[in-house]
Image (spheres, helix red, strand yellow):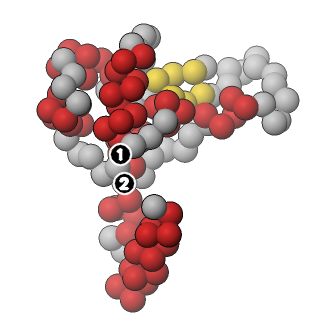
Amino acid sequence: MLKFNPKNIIAKRGIERTTAFLVGKIGMDPSTASRFLKTHCRSVRVSDIEKLCIALNCTPNDLFEWKPDADTVLPENHSIFALEKAEAKNLQELVKDIPSHKLALIEQLLNELK
């Protein structure tokens, strides 16, 4: 099942006040923001997808996830498998327990990825 889930990329970006971000930074209507943060958003305007992609520096693929239904049979190399996502982790949470002498390595790797 394909579903719209912007919470994943929002969490990866370390944004904690998600509704405030969607309303304040993107200019979304509060009811739309609330609907987007629920797990079963049934429709999304392309213009809202574009606003999210611009604000979050991501692609539409980052806003959707896919989990196969029990009866779904697809070849292993099907492109939709790229939308299978693991639970998002806030990067700040991931690095908080890393020893300080290794933080420079992380900073270097991040700079190389930019």
Is residue 48 placed above or below 65 in the rendered structure? above
Q: Residue at x 39, y 89 (%)?
A: 101
- On the image, the x and y values in percent for residue 42 come to 44, 11
User: In what quadrant of the picture does the C terminus appear?
Assistant: bottom left
Q: Residue at x 34, y 21 (%)?
A: 48
Q: Residue at x 39, y 80 (%)?
A: 103
User: In what quadrant of the picture does the N terminus appear?
Assistant: top right
Q: Which mark is residue 11?
A: 1
Q: Residue at x 76, y 19 (%)?
A: 72
Crowd around label 2: few <14 · some 14–19 · many ≥20 (10 Å)? some
Inspect the image, locate mark 2, and give the three-letter code of the amino acid beneath it: Asn
Q: Which mark is residue 90?
A: 2
Which comes before the other along the chain, label 2 or label 1? 1
Crowd around label 1: few <14 · some 14–19 · many ≥20 (10 Å)? some
21 relative to 11 in the view: left or right: left
- On the image, the x and y values in percent for residue 70 come to 72, 21
Residue placed farthest to the bottom in the image? Answer: 101
CB-based contact (under 8 Å), mark 2 and mark 1:
yes
Mark 2–mark 1 Cα distance, whole angstroms, equals: 5 Å
32 relative to 62 in the view: left or right: left
Q: Which mark is residue 52?
A: none
Residue placed farthest to the top in the image? Answer: 43
- On the image, the x and y values in percent for residue 45 come to 39, 13
Residue 1 seen from this side: yes
Inspect the image, locate mark 1, and give the three-letter code of the amino acid beneath it: Ala
Q: Indicate the secondary structure of the residue bearing disc 2.
A: loop
**Quarter occupied by residue 107:** bottom left
Residue 106 seen from this side: no
Q: Nearer the viewer, residue 33 or 87?
A: 33
